Image (cartoon, grey):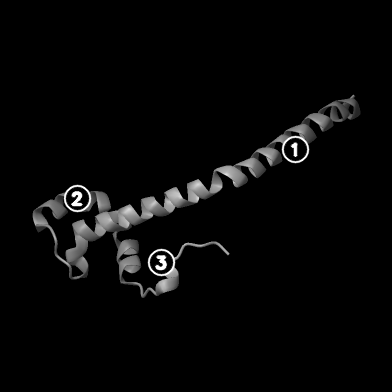
Amino acid sequence: MERGKHKREGPRIRWATFRKAIGQFFYGMTAYELGVETRHARGDLEHLFMLIAFGDLIGLPIIPPYYTMRLLPHILPSLQSWKRRALREKDLTDLARVDI
């Protein structure tokens, strides 16, 4: 009885795996690049916001500290990684986001 059940499910499982692989293939051909660029743009905007709001932490005061202190509890979890990213040395190859 168990052997018959596996024989009937075998083609279904293979078909589902094939459909998933084809779906991932077409996603990679069509929408993957858009997703990557969207994530990069979101990161750039977040970095810019943190620079404007908390630039005084790295020596670049832009807005009054009162408003930044109101935002501090919401930003505190990502503050350390932002400081590391902002103060990291960069060269021209970091600006080019070209996949080789």
**What residue is pinned by disc 2?**
71
Mark 1, other Cα within 10 Å: few <14 / some 14–19 / many ≥20: few
Q: Quadrant of residue 64?
A: bottom left
- Secondary structure of the residue carrying numbered label 2: helix
Q: What residue type is labelled 1?
A: Phe
- Secondary structure of the residue carrying numbered label 3: helix
Q: Where is residue 31 in the image (x, y as percent from the top left)?
A: 54, 43
Q: Earlier in the sequence, mark 3 or mark 1?
A: 1
Q: Which amino acid does label 3 sit on?
A: Leu
Location of the C terminus by quadrant is: bottom right
Mark 2, other Cα within 10 Å: few <14 / some 14–19 / many ≥20: few
Residue that appears at 14% across and 61% down: 62
Q: Where is residue 33 in the image (x, y as percent from the top left)?
A: 53, 50
Q: Which of pointers 2 and 1 indicates the residue nearer the eye?
A: 1
Q: Which of marks 2 and 3 is nearer the N terminus?
A: 2
Mark 3, other Cα within 10 Å: few <14 / some 14–19 / many ≥20: few
Say which mark, if any, is on residue 18.
1
Q: Quadrant of residue 85?
A: bottom left
Q: Which of marks 2 and 1 is nearer the N terminus?
A: 1
**What residue is pinned by disc 3?**
95
Q: Which amino acid does label 2 sit on?
A: Leu
- Secondary structure of the residue carrying numbered label 1: helix
Residue that appears at 83% across and 31% down: 11
